[in-house]
Image (tube, rainbow, N blue to C red):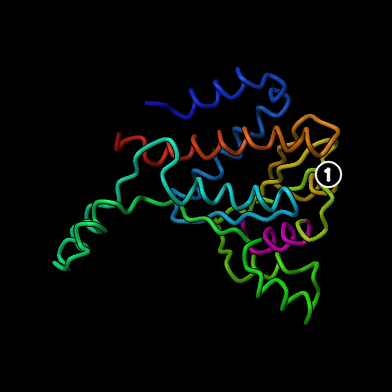
Amino acid sequence: MNKPETIFDELLARHPDLRSCEAEIRKAFEAIADCYKAGGKVLIAGNGGSCSDAGHIVGELMKDFTLKRPIPEDLRQSLLSMKNEYAELLAQKLQGALPAIDLTAHSALITAFGNDVDPRLAYAQQVIGYGRKGDVLIGTSTSGNAENVAFALYAARAAGLKTIALTGGMGGRLKDIADIVICVPGDTTARIQELHLPVYHALCAMVEAEIFGSYC
């Protein structure tokens, strides 16, 4: 069974250039794991390729990634007690989830808020709506200068969320806003995105191992 530390060591072995942000990756893991242990959730926002990354991260958190994730036994028994033709299917195939919301995916809300109020604040509005104290917001921007992501981080901090910036280069404006800044080495969008992927894959696997590892 993989443990968080093993996954982390493997990440650095495959991508030694990420040692420059080793401490911040550890902090991000701890923040996300603590959030889930306290019953919280993770929100993710980004633009362009980082928008795709937001959906990718949610996909890894909301279903099994590297481990089997049994649903709680009381829920399994409740499903079976329905005694209909779908009860066993639901009890057998539903999986434990790590609650996560992709703020980039709500096109009707984003376009309505952008048209009626201010497009720069569409992610911030969702943070106010979804976020609760103790939750985590991950803001992704290769340059670190995405204005709508910066506003979301400001709103998150005001609302008591822990904030993580996943960026590159010199970190841009996000480095001065987020609680935790994972600034991967790289001077081009493509190179930074190439390094974001293994970072968030490792974070998802580490958190999964921390939360669900005892079931394996």
What residue is rendered at 79% in x and 48% in y?
A: 174
Q: Amino acid at mark 1?
A: Ser
Towards the viewer: 111 or 128:
111
Using the image, determine if residue 166 lies above or below residue 185: below
What residue is rendered at 68% in x and 37% in y?
A: 196
Whether 153 is among the magenta residues is yes
Whether 178 is among the magenta residues is no
Residue holding disc 1:
143
| Residue 187, position as x, y percentages in the image | 86, 33
What residue is rendered at 56% in x and 59% in y?
A: 101
Q: Residue furthest front?
A: 85
Q: Which residues are magenta?
A: 150-162
Using the image, determine if residue 126 lies above or below residue 24: below
| Residue 177, position as x, y percentages in the image | 77, 50
Determine crowd level at label 1: few under 14, some 14-19, many 20+ residues with C-alpha closer than 10 A: many
Secondary structure mostly seen in the magenta stretch: helix
| Residue 15, position as x, y percentages in the image | 66, 22
Q: Is residue 153 left or right of residue 64?
A: right
Q: Is residue 76 left or right of residue 133?
A: left
Q: Is residue 8 left or right of residue 213?
A: right
Q: Is residue 107 left or right of residue 206?
A: right
Q: Give the secondary structure at mark 1.
A: loop
